[in-house]
Image (spheres, rainbow, N blue to C red):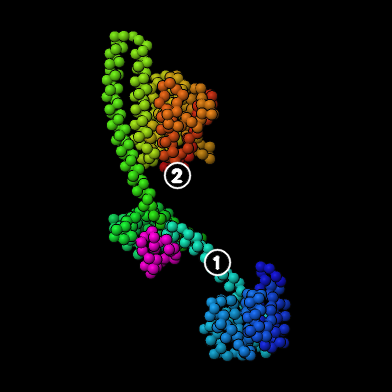
Amino acid sequence: MTGKGAVSVLYINDDPELLELVSSRLEREDERINVRAVESVERAKAVRSRHGADCILSDQHMPGQTGLQYLRSIREDGDEIPFILFTKTGDERVASESISAGITDYVIQRAIGDPSALLARKILSAVEHDRARRRAEQTDRKLRSVAEATDDALFIFSPDWQELHFINSAYETVFGQSTEEIRPDPQAFLEQVRSEDVDHVTEAMGRVSDGEAVRIEYRVERSAEIEAWVESRCIPVTDDSEEIEFISGFSRDITDRKYYEQSLVEKNERLERFASTVAHDLRNPLNVADGNLDLARTEHDSPYLETCAGALARMDDLIDDLLSLAKEGSTIDELTPIAFESLVRSSRENVRSSEASIDVEESEVVRCDPGRTIEALENLFRNAVEHGGGDVTITAGVLDDGDEDGFYVEDDGRGIPPSEREAVFERGHTTSDHGTGFGLAIVDQIVAAHGWEIEVAEGSDVGARFEVTGVEFADDGWA
């Protein structure tokens, strides 16, 4: 038999009759076994070099090199091929030395009886064990090569963090500590953690041991001069009985990201201060102009004064929108469960139109930053009024089709042509004489900060419809 299940046996014996007898019996005993028979160790070396073998079956007493001597030479080369000594004499010294040399099995050949069944069973068992070992080693090599190709420190700990099952060399770069230091003392990595963060890390370790997946950020001191930020993610891996079998995870250097985040916060703070200062300086003369305009309108009735009033109102809206863009950037505060209907009710109070109708058809409890979500809804409502007129009808509701939760705002105005639907979220884009072009850009920014998505569609009454998806409802496990 040839193929994946075949087992090639190299049988060595200087007795030609035994060579023929044992070979034929083994092949007859199990069709998977193929035997190549040779009369000496020297001949065996040549045959194995040319054809290979899965298992060696050898007599002990032969002219030239003995079976035990051949075994020793093979093991000295680091070769772990299954080797079974099949000999007529039960010599305790030979048996003991064979075990010391790394023999796979030792079988005494009896004068009477057929040992084929026993030999076949031992050969097949030894070969299968060897193949399983080599498969495991190959898998281990592949996994280690992958582990060494990453800059992340990969690790596997026991559930109590007392034993380290695996660590890759990237650990040294991330923590500034040799892997030789952590292997005998698995919790030695805590020595590298900044003292102010040790309690935070040990508390997180306890949570993982209790079955919780954890992601934390903390500082490590690689040396007296070098401090770095590290992110670690750990998951408890359980067995079939739901008992934690081991803890797996990785740690990575996030120093550059933390510095970038800090610089971004500082930049946003400077931008907010600058915008607030500019807005304050603009509003002072704007208030003066608006006050004098009111006085002029009491003495004169002129369409030019109405045009001037509209321009001042638009400047005021523009200042508000610019402040909104600069104030929050792309960040949101803590997410809070709140009824969608409540968000709509709060938003409509700031829409300048006594004639516009805003109805809520359905409501769910939404997890969001309420202040910024209200701001987004306000801008959607203002957009409907600006493009649909003061008497526009606006409808808001939730999307709950089982696949994509979210909410929508639509109006019965003139709608948005398909060719313009992507451009409406660009800053400064407007088709209204009264719009600033920043309202929908602010909406898009707030939606993105939540991790949601927004699309423009056609409303049921031809008007514009904005759909926000990816929203989490409280009844999906957020309550």
Q: Name the residue beneath numbered marker 2.
A: 477
| Other-residue count near label 2 (Cα within 10 Å), few / some / many at <14 / 14–19 / ≥20 | few
Q: Which residue type does callout 1 highlight?
A: Gln
Circle number at residue 202: none
- Considering the numbered disc 1 on the image, is that residue within a helix, a strand or a loop? helix
Q: Residue furthest top?
A: 300
Magenta part of the chain: 161-185
Q: What element carries label 2?
A: loop
Q: Where is residue 384 in the image (x, y as percent from the top left)?
A: 45, 25
| Residue 319 magenta | no
Q: Is residue 273 above or below residue 62?
A: above
What residue is at 66 percent from the left and 76 percent from the top? 50
* Residue sitting nearer the eye, 161 or 217: 217
- In front: 331, or 118? 331
Name the amino acid, label 2. Answer: Gly
- Decide which of tag 1 and tag 2 comes sooner along the chain: 1
| Distance CA(mark 1)–CA(mark 2) | 43 Å
Is residue 56 visible to the viewer in this orientation of the structure?
yes
